Image (cartoon, rainbow, N blue to C red):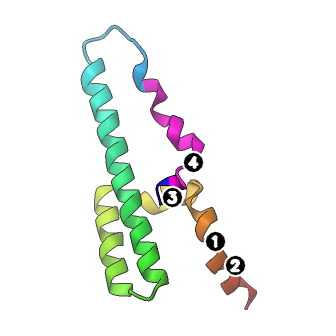
Amino acid sequence: MENTMCSAEQGSDASTGADDGGDDEEPSSHRVLGDLHLLERAKQMYIKGALAEKSGRVYEAITFYRRAVQLVPDIEFRLAESCFWSFTDDESEDSDAG
């Protein structure tokens, strides 16, 4: 599941290496890294939820979804904008046909 990251997301922390010369640079970079870590944890929880739901474990899926939304409230929308849904669109295409 680790290879589901888009190239746009991989480059999203490239701005943390900029040298502004200010004293706030270090805490800001730590905050950005912390936010990325939370986003990644939420993404993994949401993916686990999607897999659990797909295999019929709905209550377990809800638990994973809830944890993901607690970490990043708009995780579903962030994943919808990323390449994650391209890996799981097979199911939605099947349901649209009927």
The residue labelled by disc 4 is 6
Q: CA distance from mark 1 to mark 4?
A: 16 Å
**With respect to residue 67, does 56 lie above or below?**
below
Badge 3: how crowded within 10 Å, few (<14), some, or many (20+)? Answer: some
Question: Which mark sits nearer the N-terminus, 1 or 4?
Answer: 4
Q: Quadrant of the C terminus?
A: bottom right
The residue labelled by disc 3 is 79
Single out the mark in the foreground, 4 or 3: 4
Residue 12: % across, % down: 49, 36
Q: CA distance from mark 4 to mark 3?
A: 10 Å
**With respect to residue 67, does 20 lie above or below?**
above
Badge 1: how crowded within 10 Å, few (<14), some, or many (20+)? Answer: few
The residue labelled by disc 2 is 93
Asked if residue 73 shows in the view, the reply is no
Q: Secondary structure at mark 4?
A: loop
What is the quadrant of residue 28 in the picture? top left
- The residue sitting at 39% across, 60% down in the picture is 44
Mark identifier at residue 89: 1
Q: Amino acid at mark 2?
A: Glu
Q: Is residue 47 left or right of residue 98?
A: left
Question: Which mark sits nearer the N-terminus, 4 or 3?
Answer: 4
